[in-house]
Image (tube, coloured by chain):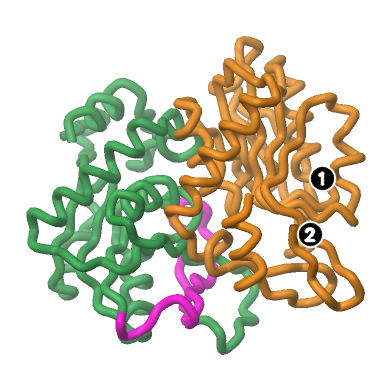
Chain colours: A green, B orange
Amino acid sequence: MKELVERIKAEGVHVGGGIVKVDGFLNHQVDTDLAAAMGAHFANRFREAGVTGITKVITAEVSGIAPALATAQALAAPLIFARKHRSSIVTEDYYHAAVTSRTKGDIVNLMLSRKYLNADDSVLIIDDFLATGSTVGVLAGLIAESGARLKGIGCVIEKPAEGGRARLSRLQVPIIALARIELEGDRLVVS
Amino acid sequence: MKELVERIKAEGVHVGGGIVKVDGFLNHQVDTDLAAAMGAHFANRFREAGVTGITKVITAEVSGIAPALATAQALAAPLIFARKHRSSIVTEDYYHAAVTSRTKGDIVNLMLSRKYLNADDSVLIIDDFLATGSTVGVLAGLIAESGARLKGIGCVIEKPAEGGRARLSRLQVPIIALARIELEGDRLVVS
C-alpha cells in the first residue's frame, strides 16, 4: 500500500533490534484517514483473495484496534479486541491463552469471551505488526477452540526476517501485509 | 442517544458495585455501526455547543479507542491514545502522570508523546466511561502541561452518582455524555 510505505519511510524510527516505531500514525497517534484507507484496502485485498462472509474481525489490544476497527467498518462486521490480563485468574466465560509481549517482555493472558464467538462465525485476524507470529498464533488457537473458522490474517506491517508468515502457513489462510520492513545492516528497507 | 440507551438497557450487565459491563458492543466486542454513529453524534453535539477547530482527539487506552477513533474520523482530526505503562521509568519524550485503574486497582502511568501535542493544538477528550473523572482529569493535566487548549470532554456513558462531572467543572469546557447509568437500589436506570 503505497501511501503507508511512504509514511513508514518518512516517519518510521528504528530504535534498534529491528523494532521500528510508527507512533506518528499507527501506535500512539492515529492518522484517521490512513486508518480508514487501510481498512478499505484490507477489505478489497481479502475479497480479491476469495475471502467472503466475514462475521467477526478479531485483534489483540492495544495497537491493533485502530486498523482492525477500520477493517471491520469496511466489512460491516463487529470487531472483537482480545483483552490482555496479567492475572492468571480467568473464568469459564473466556477462551484464554498466555502470550509473551515482545516489546514489554512480560507474559499476559489473551482473553476472548465465549459469548461473542462460536462455530457459526467466519473470522479475520487483523493486527498492527506481524513479526514472529506469536500473538496471531495464539489468537488463531482461541478461534479454533471456539469452533469458528479463521478465513484470513491481515497485518499492517510485516517483518519477514522474523519468520511469522512461515510459522502461520500451517493455518492455510491468506496472509496479507500492507507493508514490509527489512533491515539491511543498519538501514531500514520499506516495501 | 436513543440507540445507545436501548443497547445498554438490552445488553448492559450490572456486575455489582455500580460496575456495568457493556462488553457486547463497546468494551470487548465493538458494534462498528454504533461506534460510527457515536462519533457522528459527538461531532454534532460539540458543534452545537460552539466547539470548533479541533486538531486532536485524545483518549486513554484501551476501551476509549473505538469511540474516540470514530469521533476523530467525524472531525477529520488525528486520534492520540495515551499509553499506559506499569513501569515508572519514563523518558523526557513524554508528558506523564500516574492514575489508578478503578476496575483493575493498580497504578499506571498515562503517557502522551511531546512530539504530537503542543500549544497550537485544540483538543477533545473522548472516553468510554465518566465515573469519578480521574482518568479524564489526568489527561486534562497532561494537555494543560503541553500548552494545548482543552475544548471539550465527551464520554459514552456517564455515572452521575460518582461525581465526575462536578469534579471536572473547574475545566470550564462542555462535558457531553451520550447516556447515563444510575442505580436505584439494585435496579439499573439508563437514560
| Residue segment shown in magenta | A95-120
First along the sequence among labels 2 and 1: 2
Callout count = 2
Asked whether B150 falls inside the magenta stretch, the response is: no
For mark 1, name the chain: B
Q: Quadrant of the C terminus of chain A?
A: top left
Q: Is residue A15 visible?
A: no
Type of amino acid at the residue the image marks with label 2: Arg
Percent position of residue B74, x then y: 47, 33
Q: What is the residue that sits farthest to the bottom in this orientation? A: A92
SS label for mark 2: loop
Taking depth in this image into account, of A14 and B70 the one nearest to the observer is B70
Marks 2,1: beta carbons within 8 A:
yes
| Residue holding disc 2 | B102
Q: State the residue at coordinates (8%, 62%).
A: A50
Asked whether A119 falls inside the magenta stretch, the response is: yes
Q: CA distance from mark 2 to mark 1?
A: 9 Å
Type of amino acid at the residue the image marks with label 1: Ser
The quarter holding residue B148 reads top right
Q: State the residue at coordinates (49%, 81%).
A: A115
Q: What is the residue that sits farthest to the front in this orientation? A: B2
Mark 2 crowdedness (10 Å alpha carbons): few <14, some 14-19, many ≥20 = few
SS label for mark 1: helix
Q: Quadrant of the N terminus of chain A?
A: top left
Percent position of residue B172, x then y: 84, 24
Q: Which mark is residue B67?
A: none
Taking depth in this image into account, of A102 and A156 the one nearest to the observer is A156
Vertical placement of residue A1 versus A54, above or below: above
Q: Which mark is residue B134?
A: 1
Q: Is residue A177 visible?
A: yes
For mark 2, name the chain: B
Classify residue A73 as left or right of residue A109.
left
